[in-house]
Amino acid sequence: MKEYIIRPFTRWEDVDNLEITERMWTPAVDIAACARIGYTKDALLVRLEAREALIRAEETGPLGHPWEDSCLEFFLSPVESDPRYINIEFNPNACCCLGLGDGKERMRLLPERNWLEPKVFTTQEGWGIAYRVPFDLLKMLFPAFHAAPGTVIRANCYKCGDKTAQPHFLSWNRVTSESPNFHRPQDFGRMVLG
């Protein structure tokens, strides 16, 4: 199981890079992704970036399927003793899938309601998204959550594109299922507030 230290945020350049390099279920493609995660007194700050030449961005609706497009995802379980987790999935149109549950078949979609304040950006080699996960949102969904140095969050970061020109599935911590399924909290890594 991989581990990442989430450090207090000052600027993105000072946040450790987390490489999303585990390739699964499809042939290798020339696509790469990384994440940077920091925190402030009131939120996790998440920045995901993809190096991807053939970007698909068709989904736009509030209940769209961003995973069918070029997609960057962050799944987190903020309370170690709670089997539930939040999945946050974005495509380059900021189409968001925000869910809460303990498995793929038991997910409840949540209205995004601008809690995350997403900002999509482009790079020379692809695209990315930055957003915040307010601690108030985590406390509302997980009353036992407390943000303090040493707090352990189980999480994984993903890059996928089910219907892209080059279908692909990448993760930070390896997923052990036989077929594509990121909804596996048993495959999350450890992230610790530093």
Image (cartoon, rainbow, N blue to C red):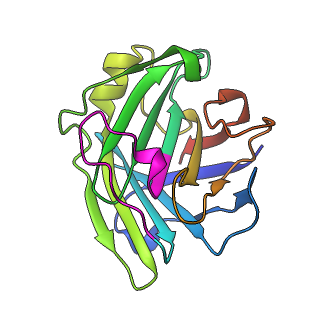
* Snapshot quadrant of residue 134: top left
Query: Which quarter of the image is occupied by the N terminus?
Result: top right
> Can residue 30 be seen by looking at this rendering?
yes
Residue 132: x %, y % from top left? 31, 47
> Can residue 17 be seen by looking at this rendering?
no
In this view, 32 is above or below 46: below
The range drawn in magenta is 55-73
Looking at the picture, tell me which residue is in the foreground, 24 or 191: 24
Residue 173: x %, y % from top left? 71, 48
Looking at the picture, tell me which residue is in the foreground, 132 or 157: 157
Magenta run includes residue 64: yes
Q: Which residue appears at 74% of the width and 67% of the height?
A: 28
In this view, 136 is above or below 174: above
Residue 69: x %, y % from top left? 44, 54
Magenta run includes residue 93: no
Q: Which residue appears at 53% of the width and 48% of the height?
A: 194
In this view, 137 is above or below 156: above
* Snapshot quadrant of residue 109: top left
Q: Residue furthest bottom?
A: 124
Q: Which residue appears at 81% of the width and 36% of the height?
A: 178
